[in-house]
């Protein structure tokens, strides 16, 4: 892929509640940008970003997958993230290194529990975002209700930029509310546009809300509206972009990814409204200092994810400034070690494309170099330490027991690699029962961890409920007062013993 200027790069994540259609949307993005020739499907295990055998078998995303594609002379580095709450670490570390996000909503279900969780994660990282209301072809789909829920439950000012175009009860395309154009996708003729003719009351109300948001952002738009003059699409997009980057509005596109509806207008909105690495500004170190998003600046990069496979360790990195080049010496913040970068690749799901360098604003991976997830890579002579990635505390624990003696020998290394790759897993030892406990974010998380131990590391384990260490304590307090007196003709004996006993405070 040809290297593009940093202003034309968009690093974004697809985030949502489970089953909102993230992976299906990602497949259509890859299809319509020409990156693939046929879209894979989640239900038959052919989705490109769900490449792990467990994902294909269960029909859910368990690991974030990175892909790249081009749209309208822009490079999109896209990460498809899991929607299940058990794999929240994948969303957390993806948002840590991304510049923007597309939040996918199910048009029937609206805002759901995990939608609120990923929204808070994006808020915490200050990530500008768009919303894509998906599955508008389903019975019960309601875009207007979704817009109200984004306002009420997510605390955002939702502004629709596209509206469903329905003919005889069938979703056939969308209407661009900025240009007031009908847009359909014709497999034979591509993206078809024509002036919108059927303008419903709901559509015009959404258009008025969009114009109001632009007028709040740009006095020139307000003046034109007051005077009854037309405002160009370019002016409206520019006003929306400023409001989106500042977090004052959240643009909402709509469609049905599975039916190939609304994907191209969404891509146009991504390019027009989401930030480039340059827009995000300097990256700051925890101990002071900053680096600009410029290839000419000293290197500053973050290792945000580690994966182990049959080829060894694969470390995913985001380059914030400078250049990460093959063969270069870089300093690791943890321990102050200097390591040599060997093979560099750009990832497309599980496929690898060798590259000579990664420049500021780009995502890629380093092969076969021992780097800890969350570590900072910098120029040896100009070190910097970037903020590490927050790891959630585990909430569920299971006892882990190797099945055979060979499994027992291989288990420590396998668990160490799994925890390095997924820091939301934690290994604990229970001294009173002697059990080894694996802690994680939920029952599904731990079941899949056990399955991956078997399939990826060849270690069979049995998991079960942790044993309970029962303790005996006194039910109540008592006092014993005993006197002893004995006279034998001599001095005699006398003693008094007082004993008080009761339960100790808990803990």
Image (spheres, rainbow, N blue to C red):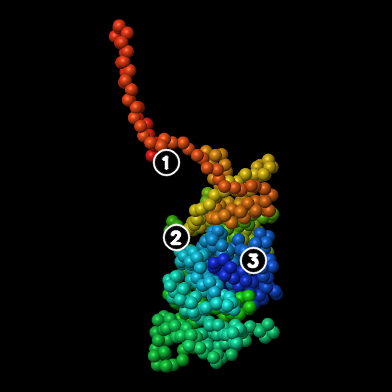
Relative height, residue 396 to residue 272 (above, below): above
Q: CA distance from mark 2 to mark 3?
A: 37 Å
Estimate the spatial distance between the alpha carbons at disc 2 and disc 1, rounded to whole Å. Answer: 45 Å
Residue beneath disc 3:
49
**Relative to 316, is 432 above or below?**
above
Indicate the secondary structure of the residue bearing disc 3: loop
Q: Which residue is mark 2?
A: 289
Q: Is residue 258 left or right of residue 292?
A: right
Closest to the camera, between mark 2 and mark 1, is: 1
* 386 vs 309, nearest the viewer: 309
Tell me residue 174's x, y (percent): 57, 83
Residue at x-position 67% and y-position 51%: 454
Q: Is residue 394 above or below residue 13?
A: above
**What residue is at 30 percent from the left and 7 percent from the top?**
490
Residue for point 43% across, 72% down: 152
- Residue 33: x, y in percent? 64, 76
Circle 2 packing at 10 Å, graded few (<14), some (14-19), many (20+), is: few
Quarter containing the N terminus: bottom right
| Residue 74 seen anywhere in this rendered image of the structure | no
Q: Tags 2 and 1 in contact by the CB under 8 Å rule?
A: no
Q: 345 or 33: which is nearer to us?
A: 33
């Amino acid at each position: 892929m040809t290297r593009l200027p940093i202003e034309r790069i968009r690093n974004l994540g697809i985030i949502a509640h489970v089953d909102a259609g993230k992976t299906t949307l990602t497949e259509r993005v890859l299809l319509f940008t020409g990156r693939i020739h046929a879209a894979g499907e989640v239900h038959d295990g052919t989705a490109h970003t769900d490449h792990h055998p467990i994902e294909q078998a269960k029909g859910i995303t368990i690991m974030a997958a990175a892909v790249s594609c081009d749209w309208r002379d822009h490079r999109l580095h896209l990460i498809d993230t899991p929607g299940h709450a058990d794999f929240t670490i994948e969303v957390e570390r993806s948002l840590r290194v991304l510049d923007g996000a597309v939040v996918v909503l199910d048009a029937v279900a609206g805002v759901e529990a995990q939608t609120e969780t990923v929204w808070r994660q994006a808020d915490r990282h200050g990530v500008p975002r768009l919303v894509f209301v998906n599955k508008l072809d389903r019975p019960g789909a309601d875009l207007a209700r979704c817009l109200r829920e984004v306002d009420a439950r997510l605390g955002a000012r939702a502004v629709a930029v596209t509206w469903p175009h329905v003919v005889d009860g069938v979703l056939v395309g969308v209407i661009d509310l900025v240009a007031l154009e009908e847009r359909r996708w014709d497999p034979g003729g591509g993206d078809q546009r024509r002036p919108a003719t059927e303008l419903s009351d709901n559509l015009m109300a959404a258009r008025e809300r969009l114009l109001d948001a632009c007028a709040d952002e740009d006095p020139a738009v307000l003046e034109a509206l007051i005077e009854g003059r037309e405002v160009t699409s370019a002016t409206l997009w520019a006003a929306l972009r400023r409001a989106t980057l500042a977090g004052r509005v959240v643009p909402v596109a709509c469609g049905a990814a599975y039916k190939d509806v609304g994907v191209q207008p969404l891509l146009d909105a991504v390019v027009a409204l989401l930030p480039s690495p340059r827009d995000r500004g300097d990256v700051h170190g925890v101990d002071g200092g900053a680096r600009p998003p410029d290839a000419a600046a000293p290197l500053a990069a973050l290792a945000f994810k580690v994966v182990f496979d049959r080829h060894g360790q694969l470390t995913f990195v985001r380059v914030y400034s400078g250049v990460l080049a093959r063969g270069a010496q870089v300093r690791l913040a943890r321990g102050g070690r200097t390591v040599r970068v060997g093979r560099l690749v750009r990832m497309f799901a599980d496929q690898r494309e060798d590259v000579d360098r990664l420049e500021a604003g780009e995502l890629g991976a380093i092969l076969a170099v021992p780097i800890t997830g969350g570590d900072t890579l910098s120029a040896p002579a100009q070190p910097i330490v970037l903020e590490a990635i927050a790891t959630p505390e585990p909430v569920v624990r299971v006892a882990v027991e190797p099945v055979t003696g060979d499994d027992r020998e291989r288990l420590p290394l396998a668990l160490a690699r799994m925890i390095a790759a997924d820091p939301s897993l934690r290994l604990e030892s229970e001294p009173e029962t002697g059990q080894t406990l694996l802690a994680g974010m939920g029952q599904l998380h731990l079941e899949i961890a056990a399955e991956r131990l078997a399939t990826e590391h060849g270690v069979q384990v049995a998991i079960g409920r942790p044993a309970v260490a029962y303790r005996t304590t006194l039910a109540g307090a008592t006092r014993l007062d005993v006197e002893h007196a004995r006279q034998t003709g001599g001095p005699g004996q006398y003693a008094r013993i007082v004993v008080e006993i009761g339960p100790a405070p808990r803990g």
